[in-house]
Image: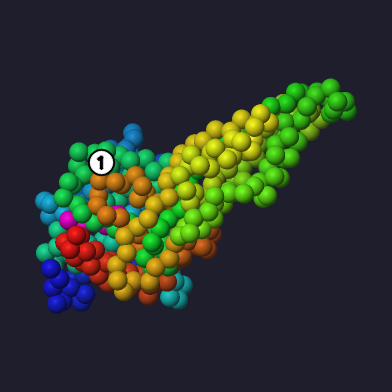
Amino acid sequence: MTSPTLLEATPAALDPLAVATTLISVDSTSGHEGEVVAAVERLLTERGWTTLRIPVSEGRDDLLATGSPAPLVTLSTHLDTVPPFLPPRLDGGRLYGRGACDAKGIAAAMICAGERLRDAGIPVALLFVVGEETAHDGAHAANDSHLAPSTSRVLINGEPTESVLAVGTKGALRLTITTEGRAAHSAYPHLGRSATAELVRLLAELDDLPLPTDPLLGETTINIGRLAGGVADNVTAPHAEARLMARLVTPADELMGLLRSWVGDRARIEPGVTIPPVRLGVVEGFPTAVVAYATDIPALTRWGTPYLFGPGSIHVAHTADEHIEVAELRAAVDAYVRLATEALRSEERR
């Protein structure tokens, strides 16, 4: 399956640094990904890929590029980013900018690896989705599309794993907790009831709440992300709300049952977007780890056995210091080629 020269770059090969810099220079904050999708489509079309748009919502599309009518392996990541836009900047051996590691640098490495795989005769597809940073609507649209290739047996998803192969990912569950009070003049608080005070007392108990654990994935964690409530400083708050995100290591229903018992009749708790925890494929020779963040993988069930790998660190993603090491970015091209070929061999042995 693998050509002896597969891991050797050719003079005409794309430079992942140049591709990544081009992609980072385009603002593609979630919901506004059209320009970067068009840029990737132009690049791939010019280099002989067959490209297809997968509609997601008005003015928003995923991009599927195939190097073969019947791809066996799909390399996929997302092109949307969190705000704010940060232009690319090369400083020494690091490329800075929004999306440098999450995940435009990864997309660049995948494009270069995809070309090497295609040129070696391995049936490969590239899938670039939108909306990963919000509701994963791009991944769901790709999975539901009639364009999803029925032949794909391996899905390699890209997120910044520090160039190790993830054996599992925690899931995610968004939650809203709401308390209701009664407005009154704050000089006479006994005539009202403060929803904010009740919410604060409730949330203070979270640290002592026994949460589910898993031998592989570790502990469930809950982040209190946003708080809102009240109408004025001199009015007891009639309403308060907390937005939380749990990182799941067990099914969401298990955690929701525990949280509903904890809240009781003191508040209303409603689940939102939910992503289950997953176990992932491994390949001999790759170091492995568990990652705590959620990915598009649970929504891409039709694309083959899932693997998760990418250059860069999640610890700088979403920050003003987001960056990727240029050496790691370039090494990821070889890593994706090797991972794709070895994963296909594993599928053939099944």
Expressed as whole percent of the image width and height from the top left, the position of residue 251 reads 45, 44
Residue 93 occupies which quadrant of the picture? bottom left
**Measured along the vertical axis of the image, is residue 198 above or below residue 162?**
above
Lateral position of residue 288 relative to residue 13, left or right: right
**Three-letter code, disc 1:** Ile
Magenta residues, start to end? 72-76
Q: Residues within 10 Å of mark 1 (few under 14, many from 20)?
A: many
Question: Can residue 292 be seen at all in this image of the molecule?
Answer: no
Q: 259 or 337, which is in the foreground? A: 259
Q: Which residue is mark 1?
A: 54
Taking the magenta stretch, the answer to whether it contains residue 100 is no
Q: How is the image coloured?
A: rainbow
Which residue does the image show at 21% across and 44% down from the upper left? Answer: 148
Lateral position of residue 148 relative to residue 285, left or right: left
Expressed as whole percent of the image width and height from the top left, the position of residue 223 reads 59, 48
Which residue does the image show at 25% across and 49% down from the upper left? Answer: 303
Lateral position of residue 282 relative to residue 176, left or right: left
Which residue does the image show at 74% across and 40% down from the upper left? Answer: 201
Query: Of all residues shown, which one is farthest toward the right?
Result: 187
Quadrant that contains the N terminus:
bottom left
Question: Can residue 219 be seen at all in this image of the molecule?
Answer: yes
Expressed as whole percent of the image width and height from the top left, the position of residue 66 reads 17, 53
Which residue does the image show at 62% across and 46% down from the upper left? Answer: 224
Expressed as whole percent of the image width and height from the top left, the position of residue 139 reads 33, 44
Lateral position of residue 177 relative to residue 296, left or right: right
Task: Give the secondary structure at mark 1.
Answer: strand
**Measured along the vertical axis of the image, is residue 316 above or below residue 196?**
below
Q: Assign the magenta stretch its main secondary structure.
A: strand
